[in-house]
Amino acid sequence: MDPFIQKIESINNIDDAVSLLQNEASITPKLQEIVDFTIQAHEGQFRKSGEPYCVHPILVASIASHFSNEEDIIATALLHDVVEDTKYDLDFVKNKWGEDIAHMVDGLTKIDEIREHELIPSSSNKKLLSSAMTFRKMLIASIDDVRVLVVKLCDRLHNMLTLAALPANKQLRIAEETLVVYVPIAHRLGISTVKNTLEDLAFFYIYPEEYKRIDDFIKEHQHAIQLTFNKFISSTKNLLEKNGFDLNKVQIFSRIKHYYSIYLKMQRKGVSMDEVLDLFAIRILVDNDIDCYKILGFLHLEYKPLISRFKDYVSTPKENGYQTIHTTVFYNSKIYEVQIRTFEMNKVAEYGIAAHWMYKSGAKQQPNLNWLKSLEYSNDNIEEFYADTKEDLYSEEIVVYSPHGDTFNLPRGSTAYDFAYAVHTDVGKNAIECYINKVKKPLLTELHSSDIVAIKTVDYAIPRCSWNDMVKTNRAKKQIRLLCSQRQKEIDELSGRNIVNTVFSKYIKNITSIIKTDSLHKIPQILDYFKHVKHQIEKKIIKEQGFVARFKIYTSKIKKHKFDNILIYSNFSINSVSFDHCCHPKFADEIVAFKDGNKALIHHKMCDKAYKKIMSTDDMLFCKWTKDTLYHYKMVVSLPNTKGELARLLSYMSQYEGYILSVDYGREKHSYRQYCDIEFEVNNSNIEEVRRIIEKKAKVIEFFSKKDAYNK
């Protein structure tokens, strides 16, 4: 743990807390007044640990002052609990210390208000939803002033340091919330000191056994690790001095990866503790950018590098401003990660967005925070919002290039199709093929760092609705959903037009161009609306054309034609139904039907071939799946080896009008349980619902659907 954080953790009285704040910040008369007020306002209040409550806001202010010397941020940290926990209101704060501080205190109060008074149990199904709501409201409450998030992160950090005073169930719940809500935000703001500390503190409470295993390993090998570091650092210093570097202007630090990072790497790669390659790491700080590259060159000439582990974030910074050269080298039969950065880059890496706050004439100059503002208009589905946004905020990155040398930071696992949307929305919509390092590849090919990607486009959009789960970035997912939604509306509108025109084609061509009809998109979806539109058009024709028209129209009555699983409604004689083999619609998929002589040809609604036929105004028919369709399922169930168990199960299934097709009955030798393979049909397309019904009477081992539209 960072020495400063360790010092914070050890303080539990007012005098020491105030002393630390005075060491970290320049205490102006205004700040001194607020410190005195904070102590007075929280007088008589105590934390669960027994310490005076005012110690908490003073230490939060100390943490905040460690990252920023801005007076208003420190003041806000001191006052962050006043409105919620004392008799003083927001107007008092505003009148006493100004609009800016009051605005930030209000933002922090709103964040606290959205958290439930009683923490949801860790095992509750509401846990993710609660975390997602907290996450979203925190971000949106901070859109006007990101400093609110920084103070809130400092507040959460001190709360995590004192978490031992709470009951075990609350420790676990707060630690989980910290990991899924606060850590991603600290990562996105670039404050690695806070992010790493929060991760390790949450890790300690959520996975105590895994934490202890790593901690024991580090402590057991502490001396050997330090000696190894000393040898490598000494060798590196000699190397730099030999090549003309003034060691008084260079700083070298050794470090071991923080515990949660080690744990994630062990999980991700399936390796043991001593197999984590870059467990040992050093950081080299220099004065300017060019020295970073000089040192990199000397290191690669002296030690054997693992080129696949090389990353240059100096020339291609991460979106949160992080800049460092990462390389991994062999020395003395061990592997070391080396980070090379300037002193200024180090401030940005440690302090993130706070390192960018400079003041000229009282105006803040902050990095681009459009990512935060864009969240206000994000998905209304709260869990989807949470999943998408956290994916964007907290994912490992790769850097890829366009053929012109433009750099793009993408989450690890991104595809060429993600890259296309990162370049421009229109490039993604119109993408037809891609070239990765000049080799033609599928658009869903996963990218790797340093790939050069070229996208070839056409002059029209191509919806790929089934790709939504195969892309990585939030941007690509949203655009796919949007494009498919637009295409579905267009298809419904055009299909409605074609169905009506087909009905009246015996009488007049293209009737919808003569008699305007509203809400054509409802026609393929709602049978009654289709009949209503037909009736309205007939009335208009009769009114204009008289008795002859009436006779012709009445001879074109809509009739229902049933073919196994499909219903067709038409005034033409339809003798058969067939499925085109280009799109493979399954039961309950949305479908469209085209008139081919006396035959109905069925396509999936989103089929490209069907779309071309719809655009070409081919004759179409109203179609739908039959409500009494029987869906074919197969299951393996386990039954107690007692008389009548199978009969009871089959009798139970008959209540739901299940039709038994076959039963294969057997038992394991010397077992008190019997296993049955049962195939059956039932009028329910919801496989999960059917399974739940069966599970009320039997233990289900396997359960799956066997039938689709092509089995007939």
Image (tube, helix red, strand yellow):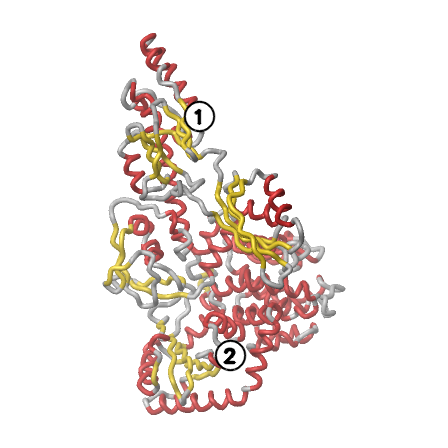
Residue 570 spot, x, y in % from top left: 37, 25
Residue 238 x %, y %: 38, 92
Amino acid of disc 2: Met
Residue tagged 1 = 529
Name the spot of residue 79 as percent of width and height, x first: 63, 61
- Which residue is pictured at 38% across the width and 53% down the height? 476
Q: In this view, does 17 lie above or below 221?
A: above
Residue visible at 25% across and 45% down in the picture: 459
Give whichever of 97, 350 is nearer the camera.
Answer: 350
Which residue corresponds to mark 2? Answer: 273
Q: Hey, which residue is sitting farthest top in the picture?
A: 547
For mark 2, does the 10 Å Cα neighbourhood hold few (<14), some (14 to 19), or many (20 or more) residues?
Answer: some
* Residue 77 versus residue 564 in the image, above or below: below
Q: Which residue lies furthest to the right in this view?
A: 44
- Amino acid tagged 1: Tyr
Q: Which residue is drawn at 26% across and 65% down?
A: 437
Q: Quadrant of the N terminus?
A: bottom right
State left or right for residue 231 relative to residue 24: left
Secondary structure beneath label 1? helix
In the image, farthest residue toward the left: 438
**In-front residue for pair 163/14:** 163
